Amino acid sequence: MPAFNVITVGGTIDKVYFDAASQFEIGDPQIHRVLAGAGVVDFVVTPLMRKDSLQMDDTDREAVRQAVLASACDRVLVTHGTDTMALTARHLGDVGARTVVFTGAMQPARFLETDAIFNIGFALGTLMSAAPGVYLTMNGRVFDPHKVRKNRDQGRFEDAG
Amino acid sequence: MPAFNVITVGGTIDKVYFDAASQFEIGDPQIHRVLAGAGVVDFVVTPLMRKDSLQMDDTDREAVRQAVLASACDRVLVTHGTDTMALTARHLGDVGARTVVFTGAMQPARFLETDAIFNIGFALGTLMSAAPGVYLTMNGRVFDPHKVRKNRDQGRFEDAG
Amino acid sequence: MPAFNVITVGGTIDKVYFDAASQFEIGDPQIHRVLAGAGVVDFVVTPLMRKDSLQMDDTDREAVRQAVLASACDRVLVTHGTDTMALTARHLGDVGARTVVFTGAMQPARFLETDAIFNIGFALGTLMSAAPGVYLTMNGRVFDPHKVRKNRDQGRFEDAG
Amino acid sequence: MPAFNVITVGGTIDKVYFDAASQFEIGDPQIHRVLAGAGVVDFVVTPLMRKDSLQMDDTDREAVRQAVLASACDRVLVTHGTDTMALTARHLGDVGARTVVFTGAMQPARFLETDAIFNIGFALGTLMSAAPGVYLTMNGRVFDPHKVRKNRDQGRFEDAG
C-alpha cells in the first residue's frame, strides 16, 4: 500500500492555456510534477475528473466520496477547485479511519507565481500527521470543512460560523 | 502570539549568486517570499544565522537550541542546511510543549526547479498537526531526527538505524 | 529620446488569472518586469489597449498605426496577440525611417514555461539591428508581415505566400 | 546548413548546484531548454568547454576562435562567462562574412529570476539582423567588443573608452 493516494478533481490548480483554442482549460494533473520536484515517492494518483468546481453537482460530489471510500490508502489528498471545495469536503461524511485533506490553488500550478506547490506540500504535511477525519487546508491553515468559507474578494479562506 | 515562528539558520535553501564576487553565498531568507506567495500570514521570522550546515559547530547548534527555547510560539519551524540538520535537531533535546520541525532544500529556493517551496509547505503542515516533539521533514516524509540520515549520493533522506 | 518605445496592445502575453471572477483576463503589461529582469533601461512604455487580438477591429489597428507614427522613438516594439498580429503589422504601411517589430507569446508571460521572455529579447535584438521597416518576430525568426501566417494546429509561425 | 550555430563555453549562465558536492559547478548547456521553450528549431549546438571565464587563458580563447572559424554556419552565437567575454570577443579578429554574437548571464539560467533567457533571445535577434562582424550583447544593448567593459559593482555592461 502506497503512503498516500491523490485524487485529482480539477480546478484552477491544473489550468493550462491552449493557444489553438484561445482559451484556458483544465489540463493534465500537475501533482506528478510537483511531487517529483520534491523527491516524493510512494504514492498513487487517481485522476477522477477535470472540472471547474463551480460546475460540479451532487453527482460529482458523490463520485468524489465513492473514490475516497474505495481508496486502498488510509491517507487521501484531494486536489479540487476552490469555489466548492468545502461543499464537497462536507459531503464526505464519515470516512472511518481515513485522513482526508482537500486543497487547491488560487493561481494555476503552471504560473510562475502560484500557491499550488506550497499548498500541496502543506496538505501532505497535514495528511501525514492529522488524526482521522476530513480537513480543508489553504493559506497555511487547517480548517474544519464545516467552519470555513472562501472570501472571493480577498482571495483567501477564512473562518466561518 | 503568532501562529508559528520560523528560525532561519542558512543552508542551500537561501543561496544566491553574487556576480560581483563570482560566487554563491547564503542571502536573505526566502521564507518571506514563499509564505507571501501562499497567502500565509500570522507568523514571525527570526533570522538567526547564515551558515552552510557543514560549517556549523556545537556553539551554533546550542544557539539554535536557545532560540527555540526562547521562542514565544509553541510551534517553531527551523530552516537549516541539509548536511547537519539531523545533528542540530538531535541537539535540541527536550522541548517541552513545543512542536519543532526542521526542513531545508536540496536546491536553492531561487532556482526554477527547487524543492524549497514544497518542503516549507510540508514542514508547516506537519507543524500544525503533529504532537509536541522534534521532527525532520524532507521528501514528503516525517522523520524522527534520531532515525534518519541524508544519502548524499542519491540526494535524499532515508531511514537510519 | 529613449532608445526604444514599447507599445502594448494586449494578447496572451499579458494574461492573468483573476480568481474572484474565475476567469483569465489581460492584466498589467509584463514588459516592465521582463526588461527589469535583464537590466534593460532607457525605454518608454505606451500601454495602448488590452485586447485579445481576435477581438481587434480596423479601428483598433488604426489606433496602433497612429501610436507608432506618433512615437518620439525611431525604434518601436509592439506586443500584440498572435492571431491577428500579421494583420496589424500589414496595416501600418509606410513607417518612414522607423524600425517597428511586432511580437507576442503563445503562453502567458506569467507562466513558468512561457515563450514571452525569449520573444521580447529576440524582438528587441531585431529592433536594434534591422533596417527601417516593419517586422514580425516569433519562434526565433524574423518575418515579413506579408509573408507569414500562424499555424494554429502546430502552435507556431511559418512562411506563407 | 542550419540557420545558426551556438558554441557554449561555460560561465554563470550554465551553473547548477550539485548537492552531493555541496557546490555550484557549470552543468549541461541550458541553450537547448531555452530554445525549445520558444519553439526555435534549425540550429546546431557545439559544446566546446565548461569554464568560468576568469579561468580561461589564451589557449582557451584561441580554441573559441578556431571553433568559430570552423563553423559551417555564417551566424554564430557564443555563450560565455561575463568576466572575460569582451577579451575573447576581441581575440577573434577578422571573421570574414560571419556574424558572431557573444552573450552570457549575470544570474544562472536555472534561477527563477535570470537574465539568461532574455539575453539569448536578444543575442539571436542581433545575430539574424546585424552585418558581418563580432558583437557583444548584454542588458538589451549591442556593444563593439573593443568599446565595452563589465561594471562589476553595478552588475552591468557599459560603454568604455
Image: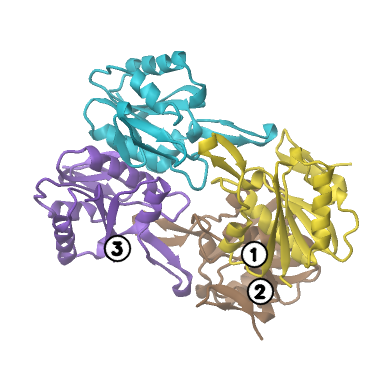
Chain colours: A cyan, B purple, C yellow, D brown
Q: Chain of mark 3?
A: B
Q: Residue at x 39, y 46 (%)?
A: B39
Amino acid on which disc 1 is placed: Val
Q: Quarter holding the N terminus of chain C?
A: bottom right
Looking at the rendering, which quadrant does residue A8 occupy? top left
Q: Indicate the chain on which mark 1 is placed.
A: D
What is the C-alpha distance between the residues marked 3 and 2? 37 Å
Q: Mark 2 to mark 1: distance in Å?
A: 9 Å
- Look at the picture and state if B81 lies above or below A147: below
Q: As rendered, which of B109 and A118 lies closer to the eye?
A: A118
Residue D57: x and y in percent read 55, 76
Q: C136 left or right of A40? A: right
For the residue labelled by badge 1, is the local secondary structure a helix, a strand or a loop? Answer: strand
Amino acid at the residue labelled 3: Asp
Q: Quadrant of residue A27?
A: top right
Residue under pointer 3: B52
How crowded pointer 1 is (Cα within 10 Å; few <14, some 14-19, many 20+) is rated as many
Secondary structure of residue under mark 3: loop
Circle 2/circle 1 CB separation < 8 Å: yes
Residue that label 2 marks: D89
Asked whether residue B85 is in view, the answer is: yes
Q: Which residue is mark 1?
A: D78
